[in-house]
Amino acid sequence: MSIRVNNKKLKREKKTVKLMIEIFCQDNHLAGQRLCPECEHLYEYSITRIANCLYAAEKSVCVKCNIHCYRTDMQDKIRKVMRFSGPKMISKHPFLTILHFLDLKNLKKGYLF
């Protein structure tokens, strides 16, 4: 994969998305150590969207963005993944979960990152 994400926050977002998709895939598709083709496609699509974000310099959380850059079908898939994996992230990856909540809190205060 040749997609490069230089921004520190975008790198973290890419990692978080991958972990969430892995949790979802392992629990729902029994793909073993690797992602199933459908989840691999969703991951590739997600990191492409992250890498091409128009607001990369001032990246907020995607759910609060004014532009929804995901196609409707992919948006539905990633929402399903996040609803399933989100509650599991606190025990499996607490540090990333805390950082995400801090991003949301900062956004509510008017900060973009």
Image: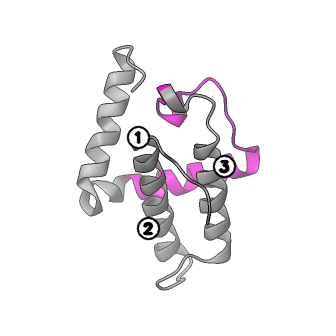
Furthest residue to the top?
Answer: 110
Left or right: residue 21 versus residue 73 is left
**Mark 2 and mark 3: Cα distance apart in space:** 17 Å
**Mark 1 and mark 2: Cα distance apart in space:** 21 Å
Residue at image point 47% right, 29% down: 60
71 inside magenta stretch: yes
Which-is-in-front pick, marks 1 and 2?
A: 1
Left or right: residue 54 versus residue 10 is right
The image position of residue 92, as x and y in percent, is 28, 63
Q: Amino acid at mark 1?
A: Lys
Residue at the spot of label 2? 23
Q: Amino acid at mark 2?
A: Ile
**Mark 1 and mark 3: Cα distance apart in space:** 24 Å
Residue at image point 43% right, 22% down: 112
Which-is-in-front pick, marks 1 and 3?
A: 1
Left or right: residue 105 versus residue 56 is left
Residue at the spot of label 1? 9
Q: Is mark 1 in CB contact (under 8 Å) with mark 3?
A: no
44 inside magenta stretch: no
- Image quadrant holding the C terminus, namely top left
Q: State whether residue 83 is above or below residue 25.
A: above
Furthest residue to the bottom?
Answer: 32
Precedes in sequence: disc 1 or disc 2: 1
Q: What span is in magenta?
A: 58-86
The image position of residue 72, as x and y in percent, is 75, 44
Precedes in sequence: disc 1 or disc 3: 1
The image position of residue 30, as x and y in percent, is 52, 83
- Image quadrant holding the N terminus, namely bottom right
Res. 76 mark = 3
Precedes in sequence: disc 2 or disc 3: 2
Q: Amino acid at mark 3?
A: Asp
Residue at image point 37% right, 30% down: 104
